[in-house]
Image (cartoon, helix red, strand yellow):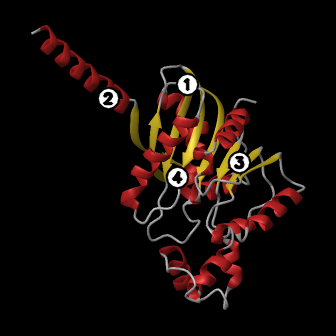
Amino acid sequence: MIAKFSFLFSALFTVLLFSIAHNAQEVRRITYNKVSVDIVIDRPSNYSVDVLIAFPGTVATDAETIPAARNILARVKEITNRTDMMIVSVAYPQEGLLFGDGIREAEAALLWVKEKSKKELKRKIGKIFLIGHSQGGYMVTRLNTMHATNGVIANGPGPLNLVYRCGLEEMGQAPAGAVCGLLRQAYGTTAKNPAAYMARSLLSFTSGFRSDILFVQGLQDKPIQLASWPTFKQQVTNCTTCQSRQFVEIADAGHTALFDSPKAIAAYNAFIDR
């Protein structure tokens, strides 16, 4: 009987812990300057917090944006050494949009955290950092040309060069995807209108960084990313209108280098703990 009671108590306690952990995350639709977007909020018990605003990578449909936001939140929380960090993960829209147009909602989320979150989340906000993976890295890099924060982390940011990427698809050398398909509908081929594709590429956003930024790139990433990485790195290095730029390249890691490499994780924590 005692053993049975002990087992039941243990099971109930496990369920309670799961419930507490689950309820610590809140999905909320926020609005800033008439632009609305869904966010997932993970709040520590601390009243005074720093904030990480996280941006996930590409998804196929908007039904996947909240799961993707939850996933990047979990990955970021796992590698962050601090327990007093509030994480706000942004489910920016993607389906049916031309690549890069989600920057509107990404900016709204950042400005909401800056100007409204203290009152609405009842926390004293200290430093604000941006962190993004893949297309999320593209978003935070672009946001860094628009607004100052306390630091930006971009892992495997891209696409770096949509002329190159979509050109490969047009020649049948890469699988067709929604990103290039929508751009082709709007602008025609890369051969006919390369400027329109380049204007949305991350290679067009390599100057004017308003905050220090850490780039993490796995050198076992896909060839379509690595083909333009040296050019991107050089353009960012050459910037004369940027705050501090730091590059961490991981020889034995792929697209998720920031979350897989102890070296990258250590560099990330050192960056936000400066």
Residue linked to disc 2: 18
Name the image quarter holding the C terminus.
Answer: top right
Q: Considering only vertical position in the picture, is 159 above or below 172?
A: above
Residue on which disc 1 sits: 83
Q: CA distance from mark 1 to mark 2?
A: 18 Å
In this view, the mark in front (3 or 1): 1
Near-viewer residue (3 or 85): 3
Report the mark closest to the observer, 4 or 3. 4
Q: Earlier in the sequence, mark 2 or mark 4?
A: 2
Q: Residue furthest left?
A: 1
For the N terminus, the image quarter is top left
Q: Residue at 45%, 71% (x, y): give it.
A: 96
In this rendering, would 8 be left or right of 135?
A: left
Under tag 1, what secondary structure? loop
Residue found 39% across the figure and 36% down from its top: 26
Amino acid type of the residue that numbered disc 1 sits on in the rendered structure = Thr
**Where is mark 4, residue-wise?**
56
Label whose residue precedes the other's in the sequence (3 or 2): 2
Pinpoint residue 198: horizontal percent, then vertical percent: 70, 75
Q: Are marks 3 and 2 in contact (CB under 8 Å)?
A: no
**Image position, residue 16 (x, y; %):** 28, 23
Q: Residue at x 79, y 65 (%)?
A: 230
Secondary structure found at label 4: loop
Q: Which residue type carries mark 4? A: Pro
Q: Earlier in the sequence, mark 1 or mark 2?
A: 2
Q: Which residue is mark 3?
A: 147
Residue 26 or residue 22, whichever sits in front: 22
